[in-house]
Amino acid sequence: MLNNKKIINSANRTLARELSSIKNLKSTFNLNFCKAVNLIYNTKGKVVITGVGKSAHIGNKISATLTSTGTPSYFVHATEASHGDLGSIKKDDCVIAISNSGETSELNNIIQFTKRFNIKLISITSNSKSILHKNATIGILYKKPIEACPLNLAPTSSTSMSMIIGDCIAITLLELRGFKSTEFKKLHPGGNLGKDLKNLGEVMHIRKEIPLANYNEKMSTALLTMTKKSFGCVGVINSKSQIVGIITDGDLRRKLNSKFFEKRASEIMTKNPTVANKYMLVGEAINLMNTKKITSLFICEKKTPVGIVHIHDLLRMTS
């Protein structure tokens, strides 16, 4: 049986070493980092990420993050680049090369290619004296870390630092471009992200499914509508079909008496209910409903109800 205490201690040592290295990244976000972001922002083509080994895996992830947040990018493995993939790099592109040592021999052909065709090269490395850093248009340097590996050999802290630098580049560009959730949705139509980024117009109950009662309608009739539609509420509309109030299960419990069924909906309703428009995202609607402590939400156009959603429907979508 393995010693649980040793396992936990090892994990905590690894975490502590990596966190220590990550804290040193503050000095990396300097003028050169700003220049690199500016270069990428103004690049007319795509951002090509390259690397070898663990840096290649990190590069793939950074490329995917850039692409999904509004900066077109693709990954070229440095080894494959020497066997024809250099042809995919175009004049208007810029290249980001990742190497902790900066001396990875497989990157030499890419360095020469960028020099030959005047393609901008950004380096991410810990070695200011390396071939990669010296030949880069702009160099992003981070303090050489002690790897979390007890042998100080397996790329651990260094790969974490490279990935965080890539994330910082991607999110900075996202903010500079004013990239919105609606654009993010277009690039993430599937999975839980896609579900959370659907808008209410795509998921709401419509037409005859909407529980509505007229302003002057008797509560005996309104209650039948509430029961039949199964949303635990009924929206109250005026003569212009505009929503002016809502009656919920809670209102029934609080106001039920012998004359209740003879009263008008307008006498029981809560005025000015919380409503949404059909363009609100599912994730935003869930937050709104949790904040307001409501279970159903009417979707309106110019105050006229066009749909309704129940929080259980939305939570099932995102689970």
Image (cartoon, helix red, strand yellow):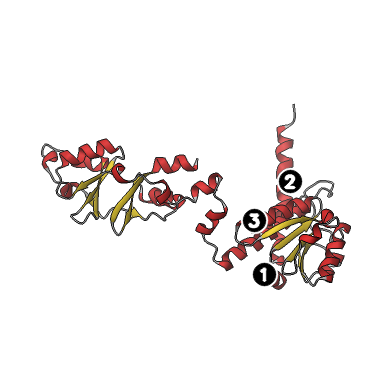
Picture residue at 70% right of the left edge, 55% below the top:
163
Picture residue at 38% right of the left edge, 46% below the top:
204
User: Closer to us: mark 2 or mark 1?
Assistant: 1
Q: Position of residue 290 (x, y in %)?
A: 40, 48
- Left-right relation of 303 to 151: left
Looking at the rendered structure, the kind of residue marked 3 is: Thr
Picture residue at 49% right of the left edge, 51% below the top:
197
Residue 285 vertical placement versus 23 (above, below): above
Looking at the rendered structure, the kind of residue marked 2 is: Arg
Q: Where, quadrant-wise, is the N terminus in this rendering?
A: top right
Picture residue at 70% right of the left edge, 57% below the top:
74
Local SS, label 3: helix
Local SS, label 2: helix
Tell which circle, 2 or 1, labels the residue nearer the N-terminal end. Answer: 2
Q: Position of residue 201 (x, y in %)?
A: 40, 51
- Residue 229 sits in quarter: top left
Looking at the rendered structure, the kind of residue marked 1 is: Lys
Tell which circle, 2 or 3, labels the residue nearer the N-terminal end. Answer: 2
Tell which circle, 3 or 1, labels the residue nearer the N-terminal end. Answer: 1
Local SS, label 1: loop
Mark number, residue 149? none
Mark number, residue 13? 2
Is residue 99 something that shows in the picture? no
Residue position marked by numbered label 3 in the rendering: 65
Q: Position of residue 94 (x, y in %)?
A: 73, 67
Question: Dot 1: few (<14), some (14–19), or many (≥20) neighbours within 10 Å?
Answer: few
Residue position marked by numbered label 1 in the rendering: 44
Is residue 32 something that shows in the picture? yes
Q: CA distance from mark 2 to mark 1?
A: 44 Å
Q: Nearer the viewer, residue 145 or 197?
A: 197
Q: CA distance from mark 2 to mark 3?
A: 29 Å
